[in-house]
Amino acid sequence: TDWPVARVLVEWQELVARVIERAAIPVGRLAAVGGGLPGVVARQGFRTRAFLPPGQWAELDAETPLCAHGVPAMAANNVLCVSEYERRVGVARGEEGFLSILVRYGLGAALYGKGRLLSGEADFAGEFGHMRLFADGPVCACGLPGCLDVRASGRTLPGLADLPAGERQDVLRVRAEALGRGIANLLKMFHPPMVLLNGVYNPFADELHPLLATAIGEEFGSLPLTQPRLVFGEQAEFKTAIGAALRAGAQVLPGYFTVLL
């Protein structure tokens, strides 16, 4: 958390090179490189501005770490990479529509309908945490008051594992009410049959699940909306990286194999 941005990018470039080396990929068989980034990432580009631990805004340009290997490279927001993992090989495999939520230092969301990501024409934002829901909320890192991020993100989450069971339940109840309000607002506009959660709350899924389901239901009010299935992703360390690679492969491999043939 105390590294300057320049060191982060150098370390990342060396890490990518080390992964490629340890995978023993023959020369000419590396088709593409993909990376997951925090913050808003342009559809075509490698720049992002993100609020990173321990609490600072940083401008990142990941072009050099990702493009240093002589093959096509691409980057996307972390929530999109995790969602692609779940859609292709995880718990959302075979689902036509779902809402994917990623809670880490921030809060991200991705919507899938008819088997495809729903996104804007130019950018994929996914900044679910900066939905302003609380009129009396404190000022968020983005500079505006009332964001969901302040009440539900990993950035403001105490160490749940260190709390007694009763205190942990109280914290989770408050968090579930906030998160449920945000999720319900998305579901009022787009209502897939499944909501998928990944991130800091997953180790406490058994405790959070009933609280969050209740909060979402209460936020529907008298609207005749069905309660979606609430699913927590498996605990897998490298979902973002695998999802980034799957995205890169989907965009590059068809042309790559055409050239080989």
Image: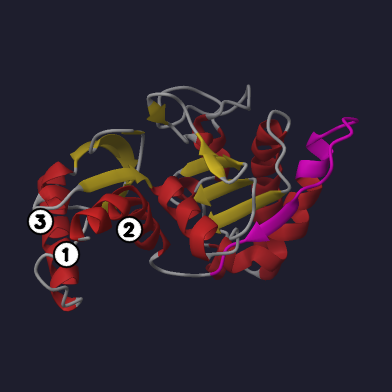
Of the 4 image quadrants, the one containing the N terminus is bottom left
Reply above or below: 190 against 209.
above
Question: Can residue 168 be seen in this snapshot?
Answer: yes
- Residue 195, percent from left and from top: 66, 49
Tell me the residue that label 1 is attached to. Answer: 15
Label 3 CA crowd tier, 10 Å (few <14, some 14–19, many 20+): some
Q: Nearer the viewer, mark 2 or mark 1?
A: 2
Q: Amino acid at mark 2?
A: Ala
At 37% from the left and 24% from the top, the residue drawn is 122
Q: Earlier in the sequence, mark 1 or mark 3?
A: 1
Magenta stretch in the rendered image? 216-234
Q: CA distance from mark 2 to mark 1?
A: 15 Å
Q: Specify the amino acid type for callout 1.
A: Leu
- The residue drawn where x is 34% and y is 43% is 76
In-image side of 77 versus 158 (left or right): left
Q: CA distance from mark 1 to mark 3?
A: 12 Å
Residue identified by numbered label 3: 69
The residue at which mark 2 appears reads as: 245
